[in-house]
Image (spheres, rainbow, N blue to C red):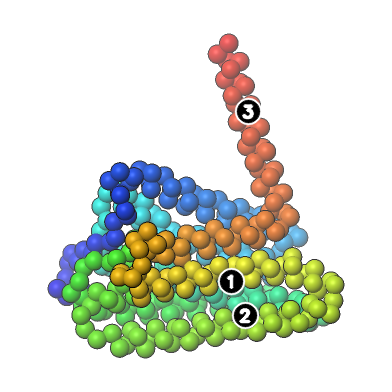
């Protein structure tokens, strides 16, 4: 069947023991999605409202959080609808769209982390040049760069995958990705492989840039107590986010290459989900806990919510009596 035939429906992996635990899975995924929305939105709102956080580092962090929500929205609504309807199918074009959203989000995460590493490098290694180098105009250009480059690659990858004819109709994953779509085709995938290598080289270059910048940062921090303080306060969360994201990509690579045959089913599920679950939670959480204004705002909100609930309960009891 040609991929331009309508309708072209693909089947997705069915979670283990779905019949027995479908509603449990639904509640867990819904809770994760709501938590991702909450923690990312809280960080963005605090950065917008707190004038002290109107600095390049926090502006880039807000875009990292927005990107986390964007990527999560490419996965969670679909899996939630699959679980509630007990129907694990997707049209080919919607599969291509999901692939684009998830992978453009992942590539954007790399570019944003690259921009953040440049910001920290200038702030610590060249503090006197910080205001002249990280101007508003420069920040806008870096933000545009962090979105345009990955979305350009995402669009081309989605188009290349969408133009291929397919002869298989099952994706051994809970969501669609580019490699899974490519494997559906029975024709040569040379063009897709070449483009995949181009993406890999480009974004490995970004990762190398991050590593080099942090090698220089660590060297600079040895000579100054103030620089060491800045490093632990602002750079450590960035390093942890990068390590977490790198492991997530490695897990996804392992799953795509070896998940079908060589890995136990439970581990396969974990490898498939780690990439779409952990990064959107980890980055805002680790940064949020490190930013005093965010901690204060979340704590104040929780106390206010608790007091509000207590007052409503009290009013209800008084009303009944």
| Secondary element at image label 1 | helix
Name the residue beneath numbered marker 3.
Answer: 310
- Please tell me which residue lies in front, 24 or 164: 24
In the rendered image, the quadrant that contains the C terminus is: top right
Name the residue beneath numbered marker 2.
Answer: 210
Q: Position of residue 157 (x, y in %)?
A: 37, 79
Q: Measured along the vertical axis of the image, is residue 195 above or below residue 147?
A: below
Determine if residue 112 is in view.
Answer: yes
Marks 3,1: beta carbons within 8 A = no
> Which image quadrant is residue 122 in?
bottom right
Q: Is residue 273 left or right of residue 116?
A: left
Which one is earlier in the sequence, the residue at label 3 or at label 1? Answer: 1
Which one is earlier in the sequence, the residue at label 3 or at label 2? Answer: 2
Name the residue beneath numbered marker 1.
Answer: 242
Q: Is residue 131 left or right of residue 281?
A: right
Most extreme residue toward the top, as rendered?
321
- Please tell me which residue lies in front, 241 or 39: 241
Q: Is residue 69 left or right of residue 98?
A: right
Name the residue at 71% across, 75% down.
120
What label does residue 287 carry, if any? none
Which one is earlier in the sequence, the residue at label 2 or at label 1? Answer: 2
């Amino acid at each position: 069947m040609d991929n331009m035939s309508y309708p072209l429906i693909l089947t997705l992996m069915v979670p283990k023991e779905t019949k027995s635990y479908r509603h449990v899975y639904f509640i867990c995924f819904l809770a994760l999605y709501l938590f991702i929305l909450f923690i990312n939105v809280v960080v963005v709102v605090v950065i917008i409202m707190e004038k002290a956080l109107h600095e390049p580092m926090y502006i880039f962090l807000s875009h990292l959080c927005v990107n986390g929500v964007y990527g999560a929205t490419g996965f969670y609504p679909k899996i939630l609808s699959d679980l509630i309807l007990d129907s694990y199918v997707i049209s080919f074009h919607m599969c291509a769209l999901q692939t684009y959203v998830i992978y453009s989000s992942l590539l954007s995460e790399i570019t944003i982390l690259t921009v953040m590493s440049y910001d920290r490098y200038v702030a610590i290694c060249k503090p006197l040049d910080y205001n002249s180098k990280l101007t508003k105009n420069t920040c806008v250009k870096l933000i545009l760069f962090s979105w345009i480059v990955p979305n350009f690659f995402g669009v081309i990858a989605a188009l290349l995958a969408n133009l291929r004819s397919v002869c298989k109709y099952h994706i051994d994953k809970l969501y669609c990705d580019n490699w899974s779509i490519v494997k559906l085709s029975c024709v040569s995938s040379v063009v897709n492989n070449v483009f995949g290598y181009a993406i890999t080289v480009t974004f490995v270059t970004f990762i190398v840039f991050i590593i080099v910048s942090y090698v220089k940062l660590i060297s600079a921090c040895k000579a100054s107590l103030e620089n060491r303080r800045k490093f632990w306060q602002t750079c450590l969360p960035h390093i942890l986010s990068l390590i977490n994201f790198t492991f997530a990509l490695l897990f996804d690579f392992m799953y795509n290459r070896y998940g079908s045959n060589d890995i136990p089913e439970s581990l396969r599920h974990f490898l498939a989900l780690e990439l779409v679950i952990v990064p959107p939670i980890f980055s805002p959480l680790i940064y949020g806990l490190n930013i005093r204004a965010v901690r204060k705002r979340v704590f104040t909100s929780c106390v206010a919510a608790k007091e509000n609930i207590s007052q409503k309960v009290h009013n209800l009891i008084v009303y009944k009596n």
